[in-house]
Amino acid sequence: MLILAELELTQQNVSVTPEVHIFEIQYRSADYDRALELRERVLRAPLGLTFSKKQLKAESEECHVVAQSAGGEILASASIVWKAPTTAKLRQVVVAPDFQSQGLGTRIVQFAESIAQQKERTLIYCHARKPVTAFYTKLGFQIVGSQFEEIGIDHFRMEKGIPPR
């Protein structure tokens, strides 16, 4: 697949179309702040939630990636938490509503997987909201265990093996 080939070539700045770039961002950078606003607006506000200072501070240890338009708009975002030496947790995957169902979610998850692979992780998992489990299944994730409640909504733990580089 062309996108995966591009991801393996460089992790710093990948052009997936002439108008969208997917790349890693620094915690508390201007891009991070715009990604945080997208996550707040799409994932948290509909549930009446906001990030606490403690939650935001914990993000300093995470890897953050975005899909950005040529004009600088953050279209999608995801974070990776480094767990056990061989495990990564994918979290806060979000695509701006006007850009959903156009492949950006797939691209950003694949990019996050490539970073985890470069860090020699062999397993990536997420806590997927029930309505998006089909999305993760299409990407090769499998439901592990029973449904559980997190932040007041139903989730499933979903896992995927990552082949070594």
Image (cartoon, rainbow, N blue to C red):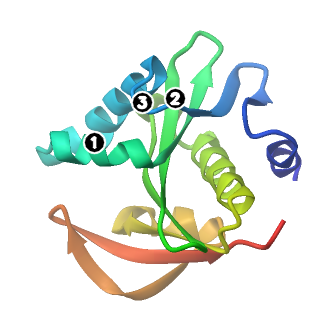
Instruction: Give the mark nearest the N terminus, 2 or 3.
Output: 3
Distance in Å between CA atoms under marks 1 and 3 = 15 Å
Distance in Å between CA atoms under marks 2 and 1 = 23 Å
Residue identifier under label 2? 75
Q: Residue at x 38, y 42 (%)?
A: 60
Front-most of residues 3 and 89: 89
Residue identifier under label 1? 57
| Figure label count | 3
The answer to whether residue 50 of the structure is visible from this angle is: no
Q: Residue at x 88, y 48 (%)?
A: 5
Q: Residue at x 54, y 62 (%)?
A: 135
Disc 3 residue type (three-letter) = Ala
Q: Is residue 79 left or right of residue 6?
A: left
Q: Residues within 10 Å of mark 3 (few under 14, many from 20)?
A: many
Instruction: Give the mark nearest the N terminus, 1 or 3.
Output: 3
The label shown at residue 131 is none
Quadrant into which the C terminus falls: bottom right
Q: Which residue is the extreme one toward the top?
A: 71
Q: Position of residue 64 (x, y in %)?
A: 50, 41
Residue identifier under label 3? 35
Disc 1 residue type (three-letter) = Lys
Q: Position of residue 162 (x, y in %)?
A: 71, 72
Front-most of residues 154 and 14: 14
